[in-house]
Amino acid sequence: MTTRIAIIEDTRPIAADLERIISAESEFSLAGSFASAEAGIAALPQLQPPADLLVCDIGLPGMDGIAALKHLREKLPALKIVLFTVFEDSDHIIEAIQNGANGYLLKDTPPELLVAELKTVLLGGATLTPRVAQKISQLLPGGPGVDDAPEGMLTEKQAEILNLVALGFDYREIADELDISAHTVRRHIENIYERLQVNNKREAIRAGFKFGFLKNIAKWVS
């Protein structure tokens, strides 16, 4: 039985290349190809048999790929989603990881590497294009550009919660994971913001990278 792969890509030549690559691989079959996030979100839950993996552009007309990722994570939690994009800045990468992407590949990825990376995701791994992995590795503990955190900046529990926030867990999910109340999670996050001197989740994640607290993100570059 082949693995069913769907595509959301608005640029027709790129979509055609992806369709060709998928159709040429004996282990894959094309589940559907959509030119917008809205079309994909409407069609994917109706596919029978369902798609196993989605390759999704970020820079789409209307709803972008990150927003589509958020919607599909709620509707189709078992669907593996790989973002396929020209964006290689840390903000897009962090947001993708935070919202549950299984991979982040650049559009200049050679076809043979693309196929290999999709197979990695289907086997349960997470994948990044090498240039993107290098960018993330520079933000990890011990990597260039990481500042030493002042002693006692975050407690062990606060660092653990920040890692879960960075991986896209909401308050209730963090509470369930750590067996504490959602109210306690909220108080911890308020304290994390105060200690890191930030005002929102994205700033907290960037500070977490800067000071080397986000050890769990290392799975993306291992």
Image (cartoon, helix red, strand yellow):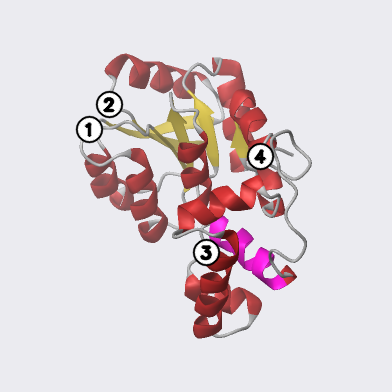
125 relative to 40 in the view: left or right: right
For marks 3 and 1 on the same chain, the one whose residue lies earlier in the sequence: 1
Image spot of residue 218 (x, y percent): 70, 45
Q: CA distance from mark 3 to mark 1?
A: 28 Å
What residue is at 25 percent from the left and 42 percent from the top?
A: 63
Image spot of residue 70 (x, y percent): 38, 53
For mark 3, what is the residue? 169
Amino acid type of the residue tagged 3 in the rendering: Phe
Q: Main secondary structure of the magenta part?
A: helix
Residue 181's place in the image compared with 12, above or below, is: below
Query: Which of the 4 image quarters holds residue 157?
Result: bottom right
Amino acid type of the residue tagged 1 in the rendering: Pro
For mark 2, what is the residue? 10
| Secondary structure at numbered mark 4 | loop
Label for residue 139? 4
For marks 4 and 3 on the same chain, the one whose residue lies earlier in the sequence: 4
What span is colored magenta in the figure?
A: 157-167
Amino acid type of the residue tagged 2 in the rendering: Asp
What residue is at 60 percent from the left and 84 percent from the top?
A: 180
Who is closer to the viewer here, 20 or 157? Answer: 157
Q: CA distance from mark 4 to mark 3?
A: 21 Å
For marks 3 and 2 on the same chain, the one whose residue lies earlier in the sequence: 2
